[in-house]
Image: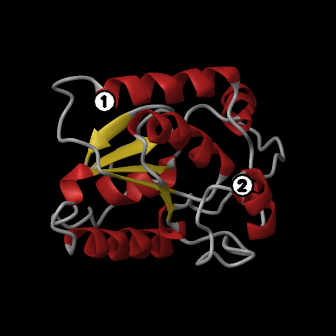
């Protein structure tokens, strides 16, 4: 499967410049972030890019949904919402939008399985993120066609899945049948 990190968000823009939490709840993509989402959709669907994409899974955060949208539109696929692939709750940006708001903003998404408040109330310990990664890997491993999946997620979750830190709008291949790394360097790069 492909793990795609969301495009640059308003949080990423400000945090990169100041290394301070700008206090933006569930930030949207910047103009650059939208461009990164479009570029990823083009690259992932280009001839010879890899296995045919048949499934798109995304975190419920707005920045992930906005990143998934161009790919879903290009392929005519629904975006399946999976809170397991959400970001590690550590900053104000990790306060999501309540399900009722997401229903208003994204009326075409199936959100029936999503709780009203689907993100944690307090900072999430690293071992909990790694446990989510293991659970998600197990769920994906059970699918015969996991190779045909793109997962739109976040820095912390992708790090927990692979041990690799990737930038906004970047992606990497991930084999869910291989155990996630035991040791993770959580220093934000």
> What secondary structure is marked by label 1?
helix
> Is residue 96 among what the camera can see?
no
Alpha carbon separation for disc pair 2 and 1: 33 Å
The answer to whether 30 is drawn above or below residue 113 in the figure is above
Nearest-to-viewer mark from 2 and 1 = 1
Query: Residue at horizontal 20%, vertical 67%?
Result: 179
Q: Is residue 66 left or right of residue 165?
A: right
Query: Residue at horizontal 43%, vertical 73%?
Result: 132
Query: Residue at horizontal 41%, vertical 37%?
Result: 166
Q: Which residue is denoted by mark 1 in the rendering? A: 45
Q: Is residue 56 left or right of residue 183?
A: right
Label 1 crowd bin: few (<14), some (14–19), many (20+), radius 10 Å: some
Across and down, in percent, residue 189 comes to: 50, 37
The answer to whether 158 is drawn above or below residue 30 in the figure is below
Front-lying residue, 99 or 27: 99
The answer to whether 85 is drawn above or below residue 56 in the figure is below
**N-term mark: 2 or 1:** 1
> Is residue 58 among what the camera can see?
yes
> What secondary structure is marked by label 2?
loop
Query: Residue at horizontal 22%, vertical 60%?
Result: 146
Quarter of the image where one finds residue 39: top left
Across and down, in percent, residue 112 comes to: 62, 76
Q: How many numbered circles does the render carry? A: 2
Label 2 crowd bin: few (<14), some (14–19), many (20+), radius 10 Å: some
Q: Is residue 91 left or right of residue 141?
A: right
Q: Which residue is denoted by mark 2 in the rendering? A: 91
């Amino acid at each position: 499967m492909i793990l795609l990190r969301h495009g640059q968000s308003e949080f990423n823009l400000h945090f990169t410049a100041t290394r301070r939490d700008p206090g933006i709840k569930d930030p949207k993509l910047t103009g650059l972030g939208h461009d990164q989402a479009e570029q990823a959709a083009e690259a992932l669907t280009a001839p010879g890019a890899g296995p045919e994409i048949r499934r798109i899974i995304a975190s419920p955060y707005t920045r992930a949904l906005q990143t998934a949208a161009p790919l879903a539109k290009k392929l005519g696929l629904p975006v399946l919402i999976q809170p397991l692939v959400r970001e590690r709750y550590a900053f104000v940006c990790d306060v999501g939008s309540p399900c009722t708001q997401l229903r208003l903003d994204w009326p075409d998404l199936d959100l029936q399985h999503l709780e009203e408040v689907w993100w944690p109330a307090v900072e999430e310990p690293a071992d909990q993120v790694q446990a989510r990664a293991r659970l998600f890997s197990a769920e994906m491993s059970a699918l015969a066609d996991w190779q045909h999946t793109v997962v739109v997620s976040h820095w912390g979750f992708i790090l927990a899945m692979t041990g690799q830190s990737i930038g906004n709008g970047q992606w990497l291949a991930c084999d869910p049948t291989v155990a996630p790394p035991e040791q993770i360097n959580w220093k934000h790069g």
